[in-house]
Image (cartoon, grey):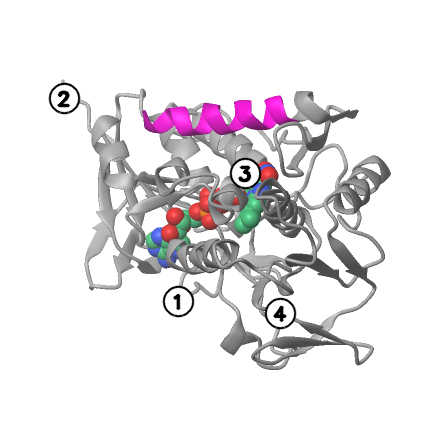
């Protein structure tokens, strides 16, 4: 008797979508279709190394078509604009309709550019886009090659992403034999410290490293207005810049036509149930940055991380198989294992894994291991 394969459509081939395919691809009774609006998977966790010129494009982007062909998965490059959850189909921007048995929304997030900051849209670009990354990378490399003097590079946002970018830039500046008189790197963070809300050990290490790298750290002040060559801060101070990067957070990248029954939070993230299903639909799941889900240990909302995206993907892969086999579904058991932060240079990273503080070579080794485990999926 011929077995009818279940059709699974995954929307978004980022960290979450690719981790899901990786887990589901060996299950024979599925026909998997990945739809992504981009031809490339972008490894966001290592953007800083690309921006500094340390990594090449092939280190941080991987071709979706090639990956899918190698893994027996169909790929369509297109943007999903609506999902009809009641009738199990979705529509792409070019008007194509695709039926599914299961749909997984893994559309990630986009950077936040609050309108309260005057002119923010004119002078900033989303670093989650490879074209924008190329713009910033080229600009930085040009500055480096220009016998720089009195140049200013400003990163707004002192969270993990902003800190990693600033440290990587500052380390590259030092490695090229320049100092802060040549290129001054500045981080502007609105809260009291870098890495706001994180463990004290991480915060202290971040500040120490910024000191070592001569990074000018401005805290407790917000960017209020942006002009062509300077930022105005909330206390009226001005910071001149030759290059400006904004990384102050992200919000869910929701599909254009949102189903009214789907619950979203203020950051456009889908509020999923304890099985990561998009309530009230039994055959629709959401994973990755697009999701608001709780950490089972801390009871707080899970931070949008690559680590979380991978764990959620592996978790729902098992539940999709359970569902097909008419077995009971497992309930959310995901809890954050920790964080690793690259602080620029061959020996400088910091982290907290399973409640242990780590730093230096060991932390960097773990960070590299995670990079190679993920990028290996594409080889
Ligand atoms: C600079 C930076 C540094 C980071 N560092 C770390 C770190 O050190 N550790 C860590 O754990 N996390 C880190 N993160 C966070 C991590 O990268 C994200 O949490 C992770 O990429 C989320 O994966 P995702 O699959 O949900 O979304 P994404 O990786 O953003 O993928 C979403 C995919 O969906 C596609 N898509 C979107 N909308 C549609 C649509 N309508 N139709 C079709 N396709 C669509 C996009 O093209 C994209 O390919 C970092 C992020 C940044 C920006």
Residue ID for mark 2: 2
In the rendered image, residue 120, in percent from the top left (x then y), is placed at 57, 75
Whether residue 74 is visible to the viewer of this picture, yes or no, is: yes
Q: Residue at x 61, y 29 (%)?
A: 346
| Label 3 beta carbon less than 8 Å to ligand 1 | yes
Separation of marks 3 and 1 at Cα, in angstroms: 26 Å
Q: Residue at x 44, y 38 (%)?
A: 55
Residues tagged 2 and 4 counted as in contact (Cβ below 8 A): no
Separation of marks 2 and 4 at Cα, in angstroms: 65 Å
Q: Main secondary structure of the magenta part?
A: helix
* Label 4 packing within 10 angstroms: few (<14), some (14-19), many (20+): many
Q: Quadrant of the C terminus?
A: top left
- For this view, does 314 lie left or right of residue 299? left
Please identify the quarter of the rendering in which residue 205 is found.
top right
Upstream in sequence: badge 2 or badge 3: 2
In the rendered image, residue 356, in percent from the top left (x then y), is placed at 78, 23
Separation of marks 1 and 4 at Cα, in angstroms: 38 Å
Q: Front-most of 135 and 310?
A: 135
Q: Residue at x 61, y 23 (%)?
A: 366
* Label 2 packing within 10 angstroms: few (<14), some (14-19), many (20+): few
Residue ID for mark 3: 306
Whether residue 287 is visible to the viewer of this picture, yes or no, is: no
Residue ID for mark 4: 241
Residue ID for mark 1: 257
Please identify the quarter of the rendering in which residue 369 is found.
top right
């Amino acid at each position: 008797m011929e077995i009818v394969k279940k059709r699974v459509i995954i929307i978004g081939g980022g960290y979450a979508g690719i981790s899901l395919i990786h887990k589901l691809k060996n299950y024979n009774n599925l026909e998997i279709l990945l739809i992504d609006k981009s031809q490339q998977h972008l490894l966001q966790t290592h953007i800083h190394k690309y921006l500094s010129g340390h990594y090449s494009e092939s280190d941080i982007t991987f071709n979706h078509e090639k990956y899918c062909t190698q893994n027996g998965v169909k790929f369509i490059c297109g943007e999903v604009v609506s999902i009809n959850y009641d009738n199990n189909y979705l529509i792409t921007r070019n008007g194509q309709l695709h039926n599914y048995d299961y749909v997984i929304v893994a559309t990630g997030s986009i950077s936040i550019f609050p309108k309260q900051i005057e002119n923010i849209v004119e002078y900033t670009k989303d670093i989650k886009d490879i074209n924008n990354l190329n713009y910033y990378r080229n600009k930085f490399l040009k500055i480096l090659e220009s016998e720089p003097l009195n140049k200013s590079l400003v990163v707004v946002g002192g969270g993990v992403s902003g800190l990693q970018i600033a440290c990587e830039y500052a380390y590259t500046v030092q490695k090229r034999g320049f100092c802060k008189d040549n290129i001054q790197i500045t981080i502007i963070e609105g809260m009291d410290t870098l890495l706001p809300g994180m463990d004290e050990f991480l915060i202290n290490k971040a500040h120490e490293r910024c000191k070592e790298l001569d990074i000018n750290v401005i805290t407790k002040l917000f960017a209020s207005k942006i002009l062509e060559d300077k930022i105005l801060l909330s206390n009226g101070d001005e910071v001149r810049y030759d290059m400006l990067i904004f990384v102050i957070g992200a919000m869910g990248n929701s599909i254009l036509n949102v189903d009214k029954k789907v619950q979203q939070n203020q950051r456009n993230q889908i509020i999923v149930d304890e099985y990561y299903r998009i309530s009230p639909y039994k055959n629709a799941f959401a994973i990755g940055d697009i999701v608001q889900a709780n950490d089972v240990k801390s009871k707080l909302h899970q931070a949008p991380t690559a680590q979380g995206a991978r764990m959620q993907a592996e978790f729902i892969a098992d539940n999709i198989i359970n569902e097909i086999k008419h077995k009971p579904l497992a309930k959310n058991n995901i809890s954050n294992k920790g964080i690793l932060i690259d602080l620029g240079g061959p020996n400088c990273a910091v982290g907290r894994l399973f409640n242990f503080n780590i730093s230096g070579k060991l932390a960097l080794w773990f960070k590299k291991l995670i990079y190679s485990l993920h990028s290996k999926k594409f080889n």
